[in-house]
Structures are given as structure tokens and as C-alpha cells.
Image: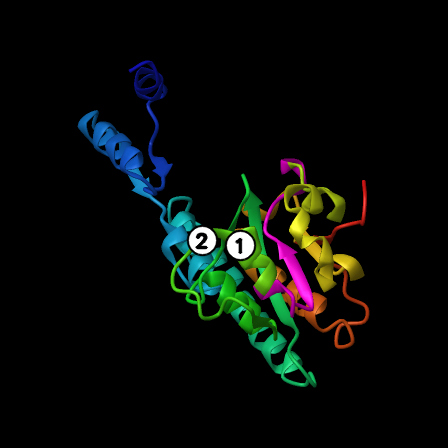
Amino acid sequence: KDKYDKIVALKPDVVFMSTASAEDLEKLRKLEELKIPVAVDNEWLENDPLGRMEWVKFLAAFYGKGEKADDIFNNAVKKTEEIGKKVAEAKAQPKVLWGMIWEGKVYVPGGDSYVAKMIELAGGDYLFEDKKGEGTITLEEFYARGEEADIYISSTLPNYGVTSIAKIIEQGKVLADLKTIKEGKVWCFQPWFYQVLDKTDEMITDLATIFHPELFPNAELKQFMKLPKAD
């Protein structure tokens, strides 16, 4: 009750929230009962990276910045199309392993996810393209599929503890023999990754640079970072 009292006392013009759980829906109902204006931002439900980014238009409308949001989005679409043309020149598509280890399991996006689409747009071959929906698998399943990977994206932030390849091995010793681990071809998110949805085109550009460095010889990563072998 105390947290709702604080919100009422602030007299907000609007409260932004997402509804990712039954608990969130209960919060939404409570705020509506208190006559507090609520705007629900559920970009996380989108399975296309540019579809997720387009929610910037929704947020911009509350600040009278609709035209600027349109420009940002349209430029991102244009840049993504340019990347697509560039990676089409590549001789091959690297096989991409993507996942986050948590308590002995690995969270892996499905083949119909925005992650799979980003990998495709960047000229990669997602190794879990055939997976239906998102969820966890065992470390052994992750390893078995990852044996043929050329690139490993650890979908986590360095401030969550995964600061090196050695840390990944600590989380799952079975992964130590992966080619990507041995060759140091492992990347993770930058600390601010989840705060830059409006820079989705940069995420795709980064992935294209990781997958096809020969096509982007002077590019510098902005939203991803290569993990060192050890801290």
C-alpha cells in the first residue's frame, strides 16, 4: 500500500509500465482504481527488432516528439537495409550460438524471436532457428548445438558477473571445449544494452561487424563487447 500512496502523492501525469506477469496486471488494475493514468509499453512482445524499436513512436507521443521519433525510426530502417545489402556480399554465414547461463540452465531465444531476426538481418545463421518459443535448456543441450558455432553471444551484461570467457566456463564447465570458447570468439552486451532500444540499428550493425569483420574493417562495436579470456 505504501508504494501506491507514494505514487498518488507524486500526482504523475502518467505512469509507464509493462505487463509481463500476473503481478504486473494486478499493479495495473490497482493504478487504474486510483485513477492514475497508465501507459502500457509492451515492446517486449514484439518478435521483430525494428518492431520493438518502433515503440519509440509511442513514447515520443507523450512528449510531443513524434516527428523526431519518426526520423529516428526511418533512419534505423534505412541503415538496417544498407547492412542487409552489405552482408549479402559475404561468402558464408557464420553459425551463431546465443544464450544466457543462469543457475545451471541456459536461456535461449526461439527461432521466431527478435534475436533470431537480428542475427538473420546481420548475416548470421542462428543455431536454434528451429526452436519453438523461448525458454531454458540444459548446458549439455547448449553444448551439443554449440559445437558447430563460429560465434558465441553471451546474452548478458558484464555487470551481472560475466566479465570474461573464464567466468562462462565457471558457470558451465562443459562449455570449455567449444570452439568459440577456445578461439576467444565470445561477445556479450554492453552495460547499457537494455537502455538503447532506439539504437537497434547499431545492435544489428555490431552483429554484422562481429559476423563479417572483413566487410566492416574500420567499424567499432557500440552495443556489444568482446569478452577477454580472463579478468
Name the amino acid, label 1. Asp
Q: What is the x, y in percent for residue 87?
A: 65, 79
Q: Quadrant of residue 3?
A: top left
Side of 149 relative to 145 (left or right) = right
Of marks 2 and 1, which one's residue comes earlier in the chain? Answer: 2
Image quarter of the N terminus:
top left
Side of 171 relative to 221 (left or right) = left
Inter-mark Cα distance, 2 to 1? 7 Å
Q: Residues within 10 Å of mark 1 (few under 14, many from 20)?
A: many
Magenta stretch: residue 156 in it?
Answer: yes
Residue that badge 1 annotates: 198
**Residue nearest the viewer, comparing 132 with 30:** 132
Q: For the residue labelled by badge 2, is the local secondary structure a helix, a strand or a loop?
A: helix
Name the amino acid, label 2. Val
Q: Are marks 2 and 1 in contact (CB under 8 Å)?
A: yes
Residue 2 shows in this picture: yes
**Residue nearest the viewer, comparing 164 with 196:** 164
Side of 136 relative to 186 (left or right) = left
Residue that badge 2 annotates: 56
Residue at image coords 27%, 37%? 22
* Position above or below: 92 against 117: below
Residue at image coords 51%, 66%? 128
**Residue nearest the viewer, comparing 21 with 186:** 186
Give the colouring mode of the picture.
Answer: rainbow
Q: For the residue labelled by badge 1, is the local secondary structure a helix, a strand or a loop?
A: helix
* Position above or below: 48 against 5: below
Residue 224 shows in this picture: no
* Position above or below: 11 against 183: above
In the image, the segment drawn in magenta is: 145-160
Q: What is the x, y in percent for residue 93?
A: 64, 78
